[in-house]
Image: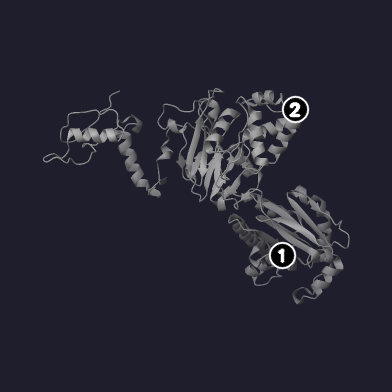
Amino acid sequence: MTGTTAVTEPAAERTRTLPVTDLSLVVLVGATGSGKSTFARRHFKPTEVVSSDFCRGLVSDDENDQSASRDAFDVLHYIAGKRLAAGRLTVVDATNVQPEARRQLVRLAREHDVLPIAIVLDVPEEVCAARNAARPDRADMPRHVIRRHRSELRRSLRGLEREGFRKVHVLRGTEEIEAAEVVLERRYNDLRHLTGPFDIVGDIHGCSAELEALLAKLGYVDGRHPEGRTAVFVGDLVDRGPDSPGVLRRVMGMVESGDALCVPGNHENKLARWLAGRSVRHSHGLAETVEQLGREDDAFRLRVRAFIDGLVSHYVLDGGRLVVCHAGLPEKYHGRTSGRVRSHALYGETTGETDEYGLPVRHPWAEEYRGRATVVYGHTPVPDTSWVNNTICLDTGAVFGGRLTALRWPERELVDVPAERVWYEPARPLATDAPGGHQGRPLDLADVHGRRVVETRHAGNVTVREENAAAALEVMSRFAVDPRLVPYLPPTMAPTPTSGLDGFLEHPAEAFAAYAADGVARVLCEEKHMGSRAVALVC
């Protein structure tokens, strides 16, 4: 991905292709008169280019008023930041020959999790001087300014990558600039053109038998679906379970044949470091994987290392309607490329606290999520899957004796298979007896306090205002019990058709016949009294 383009082409091959990521901050670098504005007009849309001269004119009515440069660059950085936040390719047209000027732009790109790309126009001093002399507003440009720009440019060339630029394209001379062609490249995580249908599989953790059973239940035959569906794995293929090599062999084969996609989990990231010879602790199940891989040959281990190294942090699929990652991803990170995005996709975000089991308390990002794309992820084991603000966690603790779960997309249907046994004892129980524990953590005041949006299956999103939530919380805290402890109250009238006998609204013989026809094997009869009923729970 990173590299400096050198001038090595023979004269007969003058066309220079400059790959530029479709969402990035492109920084043009060159002395005054080097042709940056002309280059920008030729290769980019007018709306994609933010010019320092234009911004200087905005704040001073004079594009050449150097005394307004500080304010002009404040405006330039503000506009560029707004464009990057909106996911727009942005090109900065300024000299950018000074390290501090470039440093601010690299920092801006990092703030918005996009790649900074440098395109350097290295033009001889005489050409720059002639071009400035031909412009009435720059005819009196001192020669020493051009000479200083070129000197600063020369000192900067070798250090641009160290400054943080992920791609550096150097064009030397007017002929090479004229022959250059900018080609937009799709980001590795941008697979919006793939529309599925998909089968998204949760954390496997070496449970090879459960994986094969789930794939069979989903309709796959030897890793391929007869209807052309694509499996998507959310990571954590390895560790803790009995057969991590078997899982890797199946998943790698499906990915290589085009029948599956896969994003990395934190356990793959750790395994990759071990495979690269780095020192890592053999904890959290890595010891089991290392022992299992020890029975494989070197070729397989090299294949695993190459596979993991090639995994992308997350994928944006189905026209942007679906995002798949390992640990969850807020909307501001969707389709972005940075170390921060990769870290969140692999590990999530913690509050800095630890629970009673000594495990980190994870920040409940899903409860704050209001994005348009559905986010499907794993990482944090839960006893049951549930939709939270258009997100769903598919890690149902297969290796801990739970289930291995998949989500059919776009059907939004859940398919799972039970674990054969508890393969690895969890440090924290999948479910607790505390209220809300069936969702993987105790109920918290923040879950119901303030303005909330509740996603429903049939009524869409329902907004609960803060004052209504406070009133409901008051009533529930005083008078309610855990809803799971409230017994089902049957209807006061037997739900059977009206009797065909004169004088009867319902007749027992007809009612029993109707129940039998509906497959009801047993009927409980109770004496009925008119009026209200109440249930008292005594503990």
Secondary structure of the residue carrying tag 1 is helix
Is the C terminus in the top left, top right, bottom left or bottom right quadrant?
Answer: top left
The local secondary structure at tag 2 comes to loop
Residue, x 12% and y 41% (percent of image)?
A: 502
Q: Is residue 80 above or below residue 264?
A: below
Q: Which residue is outermost to the left?
A: 503
Residue 181 at what x, y percent from top left? 76, 62
Which amino acid, mark 1? Answer: His
How far apart in space, not on screen, are marks 2 and 1 (Cα)? 50 Å
Residue at 17%, 29% in the rendered image: 527
Residue 248 coordinates in the image, percent (x, y)? 65, 33
Any part of residue 103 in sight = yes
Q: Look at 84% across and 56% down and name the residue there.
A: 154
Q: Is residue 61 above or below residue 240?
A: below
51, 321: nearer the viewer = 321
**Left or right for 35, reference 249:** right
Q: Amino acid at mark 2?
A: Asp
Residue 395 position (above or below residue 426): below
Within-10-Å neighbours for mark 2: few <14, some 14–19, many 20+: few
Q: Horizontal and vertical percent for residue 518?
A: 30, 35
Residue 43's disc number: 1
Where does residue 147 sit, x and y in percent of width and height? Answer: 84, 63
Q: Can you identify the residue that label 2 sits on?
A: 297
Assess whether mark 1 and mark 2 are in contact (beta carbons under 8 angstroms).
no
Front-lying residue, 32 or 182: 182
Q: Tag 1 or tag 2, which sits nearer the N-term?
A: 1
Q: Quadrant of residue 23?
A: bottom right
Other-residue count near label 1 (Cα within 10 Å), few / some / many at <14 / 14–19 / ≥20: few
